[in-house]
Image (tube, coloured by chain):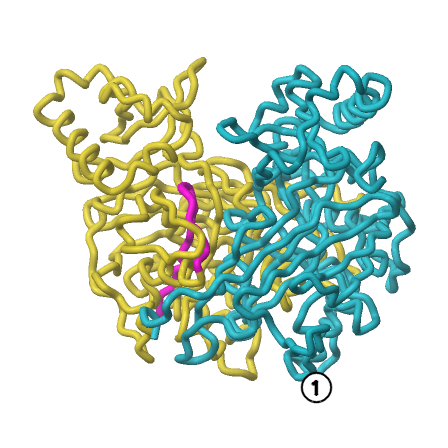
Chain colours: A yellow, B cyan
Amino acid sequence: MSWGIDNLPYGVFSLPGQEPRVGVRYGDKVLDLTAALHDEVFAAPSLNPFMARGRAAWRDTRALIQEKLTSDLSVVERHLIPLAQVELHMPVEVADYVDFYCSLEHASNVGRMFRPDAEPLMPNWRHLPVGYHGRSGTVVVSGTPVRRPQGQLGAGVFGPCRKLDVEAELGFVVGVPTEMGTPAGEFEDHVFGVTLVNDWSARDIQSWEYRPLGPFLAKSFATSVSPWVTPLEALPRIPGRAQDPEPLPYLRRKADWGLDIAVEILLNGEVVARPPYAEMYWTPDQMLAHLTVNGAALRTGDLFASGTISGPERGQRGSFIELTWNGTDPIKLGSGETRTFLEDGDTVTIRATAGDVTLGEVSGTVAQALDVTQGA
Amino acid sequence: MSWGIDNLPYGVFSLPGQEPRVGVRYGDKVLDLTAALHDEVFAAPSLNPFMARGRAAWRDTRALIQEKLTSDLSVVERHLIPLAQVELHMPVEVADYVDFYCSLEHASNVGRMFRPDAEPLMPNWRHLPVGYHGRSGTVVVSGTPVRRPQGQLGAGVFGPCRKLDVEAELGFVVGVPTEMGTPAGEFEDHVFGVTLVNDWSARDIQSWEYRPLGPFLAKSFATSVSPWVTPLEALPRIPGRAQDPEPLPYLRRKADWGLDIAVEILLNGEVVARPPYAEMYWTPDQMLAHLTVNGAALRTGDLFASGTISGPERGQRGSFIELTWNGTDPIKLGSGETRTFLEDGDTVTIRATAGDVTLGEVSGTVAQALDVTQGA
């Protein structure tokens, strides 16, 4: 089963009237880890204290949970709570949030749209995983409504965003910190697991504001993540995509960290894209090596995301700006409707599977913008 | 006196063997607020719990401290600890760190250097305060050594940064949060006070990495702040600089938030620049209005900085890249030496006064880069 013994993602749940605490999803239930393992680290309202324990603890705990759910099932059965009874919360207290730009197809598509007369890729793109910092204070859990942002859409033009978009991404959650001044070691010694990310984007705000310091208000209003963090151990790995030119030594892959994850984007329940994570150019170990090569410290709870996952086919693009070519080529929905960008009331869900392992989905519904008269 | 009853900045200090707690600087001493005011909010290792109380509490506390240090001095005198006996710590637990780009002269200088054939200012610059998110996990207190970062300096080129620079900035610390989806209210209802910021910058890393998503590793290795946060109430205010075109309504100034702060940059003890904060184009109330107009939530501990403070004269430029015109026009030091960018062992100190009020200085010494063979 897709939420079976080989999956076991971690999350934070609460029962009515109780404080949030850490659990593991098993089938349609949550195993209450504080009760099942008698370990107060799971009584915290986030995974952070547990993630800070490090790789050996992650491995041992997973093995222990697997044992409890098989040979000792009769003992822990009473600590399995039906999902329908719980509320799910942000699984992680996010420290710094970094967003990368690792899909060759996504970066090329965006380049073609915005700089039609130039090379689609910037000269640096094949030499390093381009990234930037986002706003960690507005990383929210799946299900949180996302209000359409208002802002400047051009010189003297103010109003609600007209090009509200999503970016389907995979996020990597850091457990083990580093000291400032020293690059991170091996990927699996620092990174605890993955979560799906929807990096909501206001394309009209972005195209006006982004030069020369990058995206700011176009992204900072909301970023949604799954309530479940899937441990690295649960993910089947594949070789990374070929890279040309060969990266500098600090970016050379020491192990296979390509991930064969099939992603789907649903608009109001209908699949509109199937981005393949296996096509990503830069692998997550390369993102981590780059992020810390300058000595930037990691903290427990740091989240870094892949950037939009887009494959070479039209139906594999991970954002509406690509799917509709900046709104010039609307997509047709099953209802007969068409869509360029998101409308109020739209619900976007991103879901994914890695072999038999299902990732926690991330979903959000667009709420109407504030009354704009204050800005007019 | 410059650290007198009209100043009273807040910081976090510790005595040997004791936990860090909140104090106020008065002359060359620190008033231990936990002891003097019998309020456990000051027993925290950061200003955050106190800052979260809001404007009325800030005002009442300041008035109470002023009273204790004048009419009740004999009572609190035993809680005044000589600065020489204490260690100073990060005053704030930084939530999100945002860096703006508010100096017309700085933005114009950088534009002239990097895009000599184009208009120095981007088309958006006079319409909005351009900003981006930085790394909050590497915001460190004055005195922390700053290791020269290594990284990519161009296609296939790896090594220690050769153009290590500073940016002299003023930082604004948020006390009162907002809900996601709702812009902030009045500036002084949210912002607690100011701190000097040194936004260390690796210019060679920056010029290679920054397109199209902005600065990343060029800034994320370290950002230094003063140990003292000066309350807004202590700062004399002046009208902001004239703006053309008139900004959109959400950016219109409702009160005077221009600040007449005289800043100095010292290299190894010698003043090399005197940037005038009064010349800044965008005022801090405009930064806050812009930062939150899209509904981005504020958290207690958010830090937003002005961007480099540069005035129109050469000696008023707030970075070495401007002072030396990207290294082509070295500055001469009193010793007869010249300087383009920073060398290992250099100490940079930023200090400032606002009328009779001295701000806490921010200082840092450049440590040698890691052995680069791992990246070569």
Tell me if residue B128 is in the magenta stretch. Answer: no
Q: Is residue B257 above or below residue A20?
A: below
* Residue B342 visible: yes
- Give the residue drawn at x 79%, y 74%: B314
Q: Is residue B186 above or below residue B122?
A: above
Residue A230 image point, x, y percent: 29, 42
Please give the chain letter of the residue carrying mark 1: B
Q: Is residue A330 above or below residue A375?
A: below
Residue B78 image point, x, y percent: 70, 20
Q: Is residue A87 above or below residue B257?
A: above
* Residue A2 visible: no
- Give the residue drawn at x 73%, y 44%: B194
Q: Main secondary structure of the magenta part?
A: loop
Residue A195 image point, x, y percent: 36, 45
Q: Callout 1, which amino acid?
A: Asp
Toward the left, the furthest residue is: A71
Is A225 situated left or right of B289 in this image? left
Q: Nearer the viewer, residue A242 or B376?
A: B376
- Give the residue drawn at x 74%, y 76%: B120
Is B305 situated left or right of A282 in this image? right
- Give the residue drawn at x 77%, y 49%: B284
Residue B273 image point, x, y percent: 76, 66
Tell me if residue A309 is in the magenta stretch. Answer: yes
Judged from the image, the secondary structure of the residue bearing numbered disc 1 is loop
Q: Quadrant of the N terminus of chain A?
A: top left
Question: Quadrant of the rendered structure where residue A43 is?
Answer: top left
Q: Which residue is mark 1?
A: B117
Q: Nearer the viewer, residue B224 or A345?
A: B224
Is B193 situated left or right of B281 in this image? left
Q: Nearer the viewer, residue B269 or A246?
A: B269
Q: Which residues are magenta?
A: A295-312
Is B204 situated left or right of A271 in this image? right
